[in-house]
Amino acid sequence: MIGRTLDDRYRIARKIGEGGMSFVYLAHDVSTEEPVAIKILSPALAEDRVAMARLRREAALAMRLEHPNICYIKGLGETPEGLVYVVMPFIDGELLSDREYRLGVIPLAEAAGFVSDIAAGLQMAHALKIIHRDLKPENIMVVGPDDSVRAVVMDFGLAKDRRPGSEREKLTASGVILGTPEFMSPEQLRGKPLDGRTDVYSLALMTFEMLTGKLPFQGRTQQEMMINRLRAEPTPLRVMRPDLEFPPGVERVLAKGMSRDAGDRYQTAPEMAAAFKAAAEGRDVPQETGFLGKLFGR
């Protein structure tokens, strides 16, 4: 693909990444010289109707998601050979997963900013009845100079449109669950109907990992970790990292965000982000009652 010009407009310069079903290239819009990212379905999967439908769906959904904290889709095309591709803004930054690895943990104030950024993007998507359902550090890009970084939600390739009639054509085989198991909500692990609160759960898990470098549900195998998420309570911050100090409200916010029952969580991403920001700044956060209060209260 390198050196080719797609649609007489996008000149491909080099490959910058690949995933399970796609290759991503840096290209330039020949009319504006604007850098763009081109995502092309893997040739090995080009004949896969499900994969093709998923990529087309990603484009159709993400074209509606133009927001500073979302990597939206600019266009959709097809090569003469029949390969489908999507065009996205080229975002030059650092994956949150790489930043976590480089720093070990994300400072609390910076994590609060990232949570607010991600929540703002999710709120826009949720307002359009679109859920991401694959939130993870590898799908968050951190961009900008160190004194004003922001988080951008990437890859709505597993997003699910919840508008009436949007699921007439099933894009997954019966019993197959899409997503990344380490960050799935309990309802997603069980294959239950999903709404925006599944993204709230994943955001809470991501936040815990940002602050500690670890996930709150441990296990010797991925399956054991998944079972613990369905049955056990998350490890408190102070137990996971006794060497670190956090305002007491931070524990309560994460506990609420990681509630197994979606009805017990924050009902929107901005609601969780606001509570987390307040807690990170040492301001009062409402006390939880019952088991969570005993487990996470101070």
Image (spheres, rainbow, N blue to C red):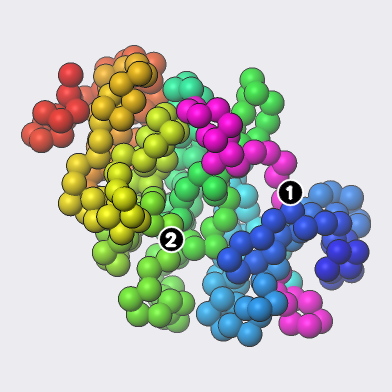
- Is 53 located above or below residue 270 in the figure? below
Q: Is residue 214 left or right of residue 254?
A: right
Element under disc 2: loop
Q: Is residue 13 left or right of residue 128?
A: right
Look at the numbered discs 1 and 2 and tell me whether their residues touch, using CB distance below 8 Å.
no
Q: Position of residue 124 (x, y in %)?
A: 49, 48
The one of 190 and 168 positioned closer to us in this rendering: 190
Q: In terms of sequence position, does the residue under pointer 1 or pointer 2 come before the other?
A: 1
Residue assigned mark 2: 179
Helix, strand or loop for disc 1: loop
Question: Looking at the rendered structure, which numbered label has been put on residue 161?
Answer: none
Q: Which of the 4 image quadrants contains residue 205? A: top left
Local packing at callout 2 (Cα closer than 10 Å; few below 14, some 14-19, many 20+) is some
- Residue 76 appears in view: no
Amino acid under label 2?
Gly
Q: Is residue 79 left or right of residue 52?
A: right
Q: What range is drawn magenta here? A: 78-106
Which residue is the site of mark 1? 90
- Whether residue 104 is in magenta: the answer is yes
The spot of residue 66 in percent (x, y) is 61, 50
Q: Considering depth in this image, is 114 or 238 the residue closer to the camera?
A: 238
Would you say residue 182 sits in the magenta stretch?
Answer: no
The amino acid type, in three-letter code, at marker 1 is Phe
Identify the residue at image location x=54%, y=35%. 101
Q: Residue at x 54, y 58 (%)?
A: 156
- x, y percent for residue 168: 41, 80
Q: Is residue 150 visible?
A: yes
Please name the residue shown 59% across and 39% down the image. Answer: 98
- In the image, residue 15 sits, relative to residue 146, either above or below, namely below
34 sits left or right of 136 in the view: right
The furthest residue to the left: 290
Residue furthest out toward the front: 220
